Image (cartoon, coloured by chain):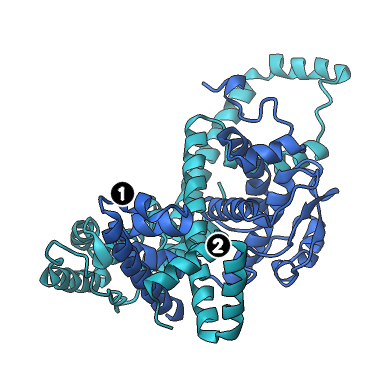
């Protein structure tokens, strides 16, 4: 159905509950009889509900930031650790010191100080050795995970830019199409560089492109995050992925969310 | 440093009519208090029972709050002397279950309450249009023990399937002036004069602008929805 200004006004008033009772009944009777009008009202309702939802979500995002700034939100890491703490407490309740055992312990400390020092040094050495070993193993594991995630999510084919309808209200000159074309070519070339061993030049090029606005800038952000991942720089990749994942309408929002999930699932236990 | 005076929940009885009315009247302190309470219960719940990131859990929480805010505004949520936070927790939990299913993420078997969640699935909510009562907590943390009431028991999109990601994409692409105009018209439901004034247009020009923006939004949404 062709949307006219009058119809838009009427549907708007109807959905906002602003039509007088008589007009509302008449309009509803028309909706019942006219399937095209019914379809138009349904679509306008979707737009209204969708925009209201996004506006509300944005409001709570801001509220969260405000509460967090004021220190009113509990630490999530501590919160998620609560059941384990409770479980540990359940298994080994703190009963306090047992008087009957206190004397032998003191004797052990007095007569075996040298042995304790040696044992502690040995334990420290073993501990440091173990840490170095596990750290290296973790690093190897993380490297493999990053590589696997990159291979899974990398596509040499860029998503096409959405087709924008001409804006008849635009007074200023339209954005340079040639600039957009150049950006897409630069991005295409940069993504090809992602498969090279030395990723640093590619990261530099993608950083420049990611700072640009529009579809290609947004796409460059995603490929920059992948480049960081490939270069084993998760700490740089994560904030970028979070940004993409939270940006409604970002061409790679869904992929960023999936990748973040994968990274969270594969993160080594602290 | 945070003091007791900063606490938005100080002297707020969340299970009473006054709290519900404060939310209806859009008092910031009431919303802050509600958010903190749902945050405290939902975040550890979701994080301990699934391998989702903190950001995703926060996203779900904020979507649940948004859904509740809309239900409250359009009268689909009606207070029935039960804690509001317990109800919002349930909204978030259902969204979380949907999210796990959609992304093929397994729930971690931690508690017996997983059985209860299966029977309390979003599908069973969304297919029901009549008033239902669901089992949630007397306070938010004890959600399995008492009940809160839902006016419609279903999703806010009971009449149509809103693809809000497509809405987001379309909205991002319409341009700044159209964003202002469309938000003013669809969300705030303000007059043409007021909406036009926000982007420096007289009423007649604003009328044309609003129409063109709505047409563009509709075309983009239809395109992205079918992508």
Residue B102 position within the rendered picture, expressed as x and y whole percent measured from the top left: 59, 71
Name which residue lies at 40% across and 77% down.
Answer: A3
Label 2 Cα crowd, 10 Å radius (few <14 / some 14-19 / many 20+)? some
Give residue A206's position: percent from left, percent from top.
Answer: 22, 61
Chain of the residue where label 2 is placed in the rendered structure: A
Which residue carries the number 1 mark? B197
Residue in view at x 34 percent, y 76 percent: A155
> Observer-nearest residue: B112 or A127?
B112
Q: Which chain is cyan?
A: A
Residue at x-position 54% and y-position 60%: A16
Q: Is residue A243 left or right of residue B138?
A: left
Mark 1 or 2, which is nearer the eye? Answer: 2
Left or right relative to B76: residue A128 = left
List the single residue furthest toward the right: A100
Q: Is residue B92 left or right of residue A3?
A: right
Residue under circle 2? A19
Q: Residue A220: image x %, image y %?
A: 27, 64
User: Badge 1 sits on which subunit?
Assistant: B
Q: At which x and y percent is residue A214?
A: 25, 63
Q: Colour of chain B?
A: blue
Q: Is residue B218 above or below residue B50?
A: below
Query: Are dots 1 and 2 on a single chain?
Result: no
Q: CA distance from mark 1 to mark 2?
A: 24 Å
Of A76 and B220, which appears nearest the observer? B220
Q: Is residue A56 above or below residue B132?
A: above
């Amino acid at each position: 159905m062709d949307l006219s200004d009058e119809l838009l006004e009427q549907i708007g008033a109807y959905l906002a509950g602003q039509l007088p009772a008589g007009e509302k009944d008449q309009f509803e009777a028309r909706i019942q009889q006219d399937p095209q009008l019914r379809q138009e009202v349904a679509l306008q309702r979707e737009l209204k509900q969708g925009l209201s939802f996004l506006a509300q979500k944005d409001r709570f995002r801001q509220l969260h930031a405000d509460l967090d700034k004021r220190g009113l939100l509990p630490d999530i890491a501590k919160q998620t650790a609560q059941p384990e703490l409770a479980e540990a407490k359940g298994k080994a309740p703190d009963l306090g010191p047992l008087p009957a055992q206190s004397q032998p312990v003191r004797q052990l400390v007095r007569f075996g100080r040298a042995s304790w020092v040696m044992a502690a040094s040995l334990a420290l050495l073993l501990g440091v050795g173990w840490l170095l070993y596990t750290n290296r193993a973790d690093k190897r594991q993380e490297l493999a995970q990053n590589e696997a995630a990159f291979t899974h999510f990398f596509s040499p084919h860029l998503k096409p830019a959405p087709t924008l309808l001409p804006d008849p209200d635009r007074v200023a000159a339209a954005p340079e199409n040639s600039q957009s074309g150049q950006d897409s070519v630069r991005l295409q070339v940069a993504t090809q560089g992602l498969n090279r061993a030395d990723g640093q030049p590619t990261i530099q090029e993608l950083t420049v492109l990611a700072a640009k606005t529009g579809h290609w800038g947004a796409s460059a952000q995603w490929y920059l995050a992948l480049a960081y991942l490939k270069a084993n720089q998760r700490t740089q990749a994560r904030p970028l992925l979070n940004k993409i994942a939270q940006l409604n309408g970002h061409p790679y929002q869904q992929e960023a969310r999936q990748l973040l999930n994968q990274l969270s699932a594969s993160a080594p236990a602290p | 440093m945070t003091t007791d005076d900063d606490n938005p929940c100080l002297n707020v009885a969340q299970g009473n009519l006054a709290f519900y009315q404060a939310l209806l009247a859009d008092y910031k302190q009431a919303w802050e208090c509600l958010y903190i309470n749902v945050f405290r219960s939902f975040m550890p719940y979701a994080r301990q029972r699934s391998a989702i990131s903190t950001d995703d859990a926060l996203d779900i929480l904020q979507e649940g709050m948004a859904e509740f805010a809309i239900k409250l505004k359009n009268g689909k949520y009606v207070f029935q002397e039960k804690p509001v936070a317990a109800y919002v927790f349930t909204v978030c939990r259902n969204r979380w279950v949907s999210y796990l299913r959609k992304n093929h993420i397994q729930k971690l078997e931690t508690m017996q309450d997983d059985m209860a969640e299966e029977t309390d699935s979003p599908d069973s909510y969304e297919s029901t249009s009549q008033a239902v009562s669901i089992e949630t907590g007397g306070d938010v943390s004890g959600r399995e023990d008492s009940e809160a009431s839902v006016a419609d028991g279903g999703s806010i999109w009971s009449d149509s399937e809103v693809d809000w990601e497509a809405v987001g994409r379309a909205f991002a692409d319409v341009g700044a002036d159209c964003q202002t105009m469309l938000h003013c018209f669809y969300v705030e439901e303000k007059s043409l004069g007021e909406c036009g004034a926000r982007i420096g247009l007289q009423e007649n020009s604003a009328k044309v602008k609003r129409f063109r923006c709505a047409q563009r939004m509709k075309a983009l949404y239809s395109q992205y929805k079918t992508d």
